[in-house]
Amino acid sequence: MRYIVSILFLWSFHLCMAQNHTMPLWEGEIPNAKKSDLQEEQKNAQARVISKVIEPSLEVYLPSSVIKTGKMVMICPGGGYGVLAYDKEGTDIAKWLNGYGIAAAVLKYRLPEDGSNEIPHLTPLMDAKRGVELIRSNAEKWGIDPNKVGVMGFSAGGHLASTLGTHFEEGNRPNFMALIYPVVTMKQDHTHNGSRKNLLGPDPSDNLVEHYSNELQVRENTPPTFILHSTDDEVVPLENSLQLAKSLKDKGISVEMHVYPYGGHGFAMALQQGRLSKWGQLLLDWLSDI
């Protein structure tokens, strides 16, 4: 019995040795930025919600070397492209992944604020691409496999993640995507109107709408994708995920999709929500095959 207790203590100690640090996304001049009077705001200290991001960053969480898998996930919190649900859909997820040996980095990306961006709709994707490039450039130091770097996004963060997975360039293609109740389309029928307006403005051109409707932008080398949604989501309709899953299937891209009859929108880890609370294990099982 004493031996078992000692083993459990050592295991807990190694888990506690997980490390985290924050690094700026850009050194020197930040691209597509312009001078403004905006200052970053944070609300709710228990579950931070961040807005008016001026200096984007990566908050990196590295698991104990004892359990590390070599995989890393860049997490894009949601918030309708107006705020970031930074803890609920960011740091909480990173810490959970670390417990299973998966490194994570929470992307604090700039939001398309007219006052702080030259061309607002370009900024989030620019930051996401840079995030993947930074992760890969630090792969050896962080003990991760540069060919096992994925992106995960919630709600509007899911739109950013799926935009990265369909609009990437050499060096910033994610190796896999996990999209949780994602916004996918910018077309009027099924989009989330707040995300669309914040990203594209009140009267976007048809070309811009199509460019950011990611169900229309799937390529043959779009990465394998995990999708989670609920049928009773009244904020971001299920059709966003259904349309993307069909496009992925039509292009021959591996896609795994789980649809729950309850959960609504914004459930994150879905603690104490019955079977839905087990969705994380489904993701871990899927990641084990990546």
Image (spheres, grey):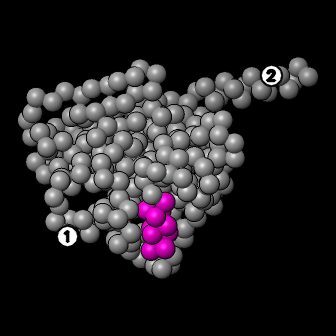
Residue 215 pos. (x, y %): 39, 69
Q: Which residue corresponds to mark 2?
A: 6
| Up/down of 97 relative to 40, above or below | below
Kind of residue indicated by mark 2: Ser
Question: Which sits in the foreground, 58 or 213?
Answer: 213
What is the CA distance from the residue labelled 1 to the residue labelled 2? 62 Å
Q: Which residue appears at 35% of the width and 37% of the height? A: 84
Reply above or below: 267 against 12: below
Q: Amino acid at mark 1?
A: Asn
Principal secondary structure, stretch drawn in magenta: helix
Camera-nearest label, 1 or 2: 1
**Neighbour tally class for label 1: few under 14, some 14-19, many 20 plus, Cα within 10 Å:** few
Furthest toward the left, the residue is 35
Identify residue for label 1: 207
Q: Is residue 241 magenta?
A: yes
Which quarter of the rendered picture does the C terminus lie within? bottom right
Point out residue 121 in the picture as x, y percentages from the top left corner.
20, 53
Residue 250 visible in the current orientation: yes
**Residue 177: image x %, image y %?**
47, 58
> Which residue corresponds to the image point at 20% horizontal and 65% vertical from the top-left?
208
Q: Is residue 104 visible?
A: no
Residue found at the very far right of the displayed protein = 1
Looking at the rendered structure, the secondary structure element under dot 2 is: helix
| Residue density around tag 2, few if under 14, some if 14–19, many if 20 or more, within 10 Å | few
Give me the disc on residue 266.
Answer: none
